[in-house]
Amino acid sequence: MSHRLRNGLSSLFLLVMVSVVPTNFAGEATRAGDVRRHLARGREAMKANQLDEAEREFREALRLNPNSAEAYANLGLIAFAQTRYAKAATAFRAALRLRPSLWDAQAYLGLTEVRLGHTRTAVPLLTESFSRLQDATLKTRVGLELVRTHVEAKDFGQGLDVLRILQGASPNDPDVWYTVYRMHSELAAQALATLVQVAPQSARVHQALAQALESQDDVAGAIAQYRKVLEIDPQTPGIHSELGRLMLVISQQEPARQQAQKEFEAELALNPTDANSENELGQIYWLRANLEEAFRHYSHALELQPDFVDAHAGLGKVLTAMGQPEQALRHLLEAARLNPQNDVAHYRLAQAYRKLGRTDDAHREWTVFQKLRESQAPLRALYQQIQQRPVTDETTDFGNPQ
């Protein structure tokens, strides 16, 4: 073969190669474009809840590209939505084999395994994906499922850890807060059962019974249980204070005040640093219109606990009644600063500003008070339904400030 012929064949070979390579690239590009179009159509069909159409598009995308993790993941979502959990699990696993970092797919695989009853398989999948999820709705769903599995396994510590994350991530989700309520109820029930088992005749058992009876609006029964606590252990802290508080729940007439006062004073004899009892004594003397003694007890409560909101509000109302609204403002503003949602503080501020002739400030605080009262009305109504008695306020007189 001549040198010229060999060069000609080589040139032909090169020409074929040059012509073939662009043709293959063009075919691959066309196929990739078709895959993208099918995936896009599938996503649009899913948004329109046309799941059968979406499934056809994703399967066509897989026919053209068997390594499309996105197509597998979306087929898993469709099967999950249609409760075809075995098919969903197969699709999600295929997607994760192709792309292990698809955390949404892993999360849904975990949820699918839960539906299939494979909890032990599901928990690692949910746990690993939970911290990496960006979609808030899916993160909440996975978190709540994790909490449920932890509670069923009596692993309350891990359940609480997940709940703390959910409270920050979804602070307005009712399912999250209901789960928080259920978790703590479960913990309380378990703790009480253990307490009764290990120390059935202890003062703490009667204290727990007293709190349970009070939650059921059985105030007389709660008082009887608190008295049993003192019979068993007269030094138990807080019991005299609880007795005094319940006596004022039954009645705020003078005989009840006298009994309550004895209990608060007995508590202070055991614990002279009990700011709550000092505050309650301030309220008793306020009800008696003994402003000097009310001032003394509220002031002492604040010496013991400088950030005591109720004591600041109580001292503010006393100073206003004593004709010292300027001094009252300092305490009332501090109460509102410590707890901006405290309607009592804003009510008392309106009174103090009115006394000072600061009409605009009084109107502003009165408006804040009314808005807070309105926003709290559903909660107050719920408490009233649960306790079957009105919710009273210790430091607020109803009506417009004079």
Image: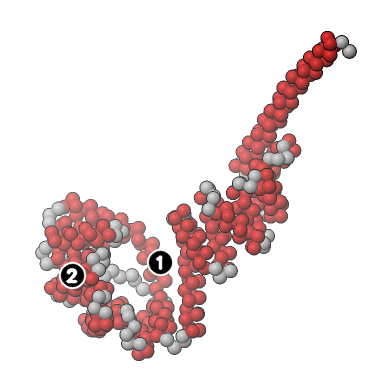
Residue 376, percent from left and from top? 35, 61
* Circle 1: residue type: Leu
The mark tally for this picture is: 2
Residue 101 visible in the shown view: yes
Q: Is residue 71 above or below residue 336?
A: above
Q: Is residue 247 visible to the viewer in this orientation of the structure?
A: no
User: What residue is drawn where x is 46% and y is 85%?
Assistant: 199
Split into 4 quadrants, where in the image is the C terminus? bottom left
Task: Indicate whether 346 appears above or below 134.
Answer: below
Q: Residue at x 83, y 9 (%)?
A: 4
| Quadrant of the rendering where the N terminus is positioned | top right
- Image height of 193 relative to 396, above or below: below
Residue 107: percent from left, percent from top: 60, 53
Q: Secondary structure at mark 2?
A: helix
At x 59%, y 49%, the residue is 103
Could you say which is closer to the camera, residue 306 or residue 34? 306
Give whichever of discs 2 and 1 has the lower sequence position. Answer: 2
Residue hosting label 2: 299
Q: Residue furthest right?
A: 1
Name the residue at the left extreme: 323
Q: Label 1 belongs to which residue?
A: 382
Q: Position of residue 23 (x, y in %)?
A: 74, 23
> How many neighbours does mark 2 have within 10 angstroms: few (below 14), some (14-19), or many (20 or more)?
many
Foreground tag (2 vs 1): 2
Hey, which residue is sitting farthest bottom in the picture? 231
Question: Tag 1, which secondary structure?
Answer: helix
The residue type indicated by label 2 comes to: Ser
Q: Is residue 316 left or right of residue 63?
A: left
Q: Alpha-carbon neighbours of circle 1 within 10 Å: few (<14), some, or many (≥20)?
A: few
User: Residue 323: horizontal and vertical position, in percent?
Assistant: 10, 64
Q: Which mark is residue 289?
A: none
**Would you place residue 136 above or below residue 191 in this image?**
above
